[in-house]
Image (cartoon, rainbow, N blue to C red):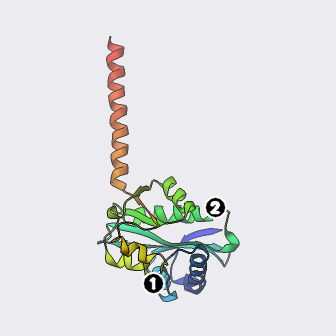
Amino acid sequence: MKIVTANKSHFKYAEIICETIETSAQVRGTGIAKRTPEYIQKKLESGDAVIALDGDKFAGFCYIETWENKSYVVHSGLIVHPDYRNQGLAKKIKTKVFNYSKEKYPGAKVFGITTGLAVMKINSDLGYKPVTFSELTQDDAFWNGCKSCRNFDILTRNDRKMCLCTGMLYDPKAKTSKEEGASLFRKKLEQLKNKLVKK
């Protein structure tokens, strides 16, 4: 199994990616936004996607979108083909696209909205925190992507402040602050130890 940054050579998988996304959304009853093969091909061509392949067989996929001048990044269409589910592949794909996003868009906040507990667990393991929708992008184009979800009326009734999805955010600056805090703590602890030794 290989998980690679996608490119033009993966165009032949666009149809099966769309079919797998749509079927999964129907089964769950909530929406991964419906996408066309042409849209998926744009993501493949721009290098804003990762694909999992078992030889030549499609196994999984996820793509990147950016919002507000690349200050926000979201991973969309995370999907694993039914033949490869329950093997930990979703976590491997998500980890690959997450690390790739941090390299390609350094400093951007990475976020997602989901109803899936498995995705919430993966996101949490990667350092995402649950947040209110007000902390996510306010770009209308992002929220318009929810129109194909059967719960879109709930989102609009609540002025995009809440829905059935949970908002999750990875803020690299918050992580840096946390690391700086830990470093400051270690420094203070060392100073205290030195004072005790001198006594």
Residue 7 numbered tag: none
Q: How far is the residue under mark 2 from the one under mark 1? A: 27 Å
Q: Which residue is mark 1?
A: 42
Q: Nearer the viewer, mark 2 or mark 1?
A: 2
Q: Residues within 10 Å of mark 2 (few under 14, many from 20)?
A: few
Q: Amino acid at mark 2?
A: Gly
Q: Residues within 10 Å of mark 1 (few under 14, many from 20)?
A: some
Q: Is residue 101 left or right of residue 86?
A: left
Residue at the extreme left of the image, as rendered: 69
Mark 1 or mark 2, which is nearer the start of the sequence?
Answer: 1
* Position in image of residue 159 (x %, y %): 33, 71
Work out which quarter of the rendered image holds the C terminus and state it. Answer: top left
* Position in image of residue 128 (x %, y %): 44, 56
Indicate whether 112 appears above or below 185.
below
Indicate whether 40 appears above or below 165.
below
Q: Residue at x 36, y 26 (%)?
A: 190
* Position in image of residue 93 (x %, y %): 56, 66
Q: Residue at x 42, y 56 (%)?
A: 130
Mark 2 in CB contact with mark 1 (< 8 angstroms)? no
* Position in image of residue 101 (x %, y %): 43, 65
SS class, disc 1: helix
Indicate whether 106 appears above or below 36.
above
Of 94 and 47, nearer the camera is: 94
Work out which quarter of the rendered image holds the N terminus and state it. Answer: bottom right
Q: Amino acid at mark 1?
A: Lys
Q: Is residue 85 left or right of residue 79?
A: right
Of 31 and 126, nearer the camera is: 31
Q: Which residue is mark 2?
A: 88
Of 1 and 142, nearer the camera is: 142
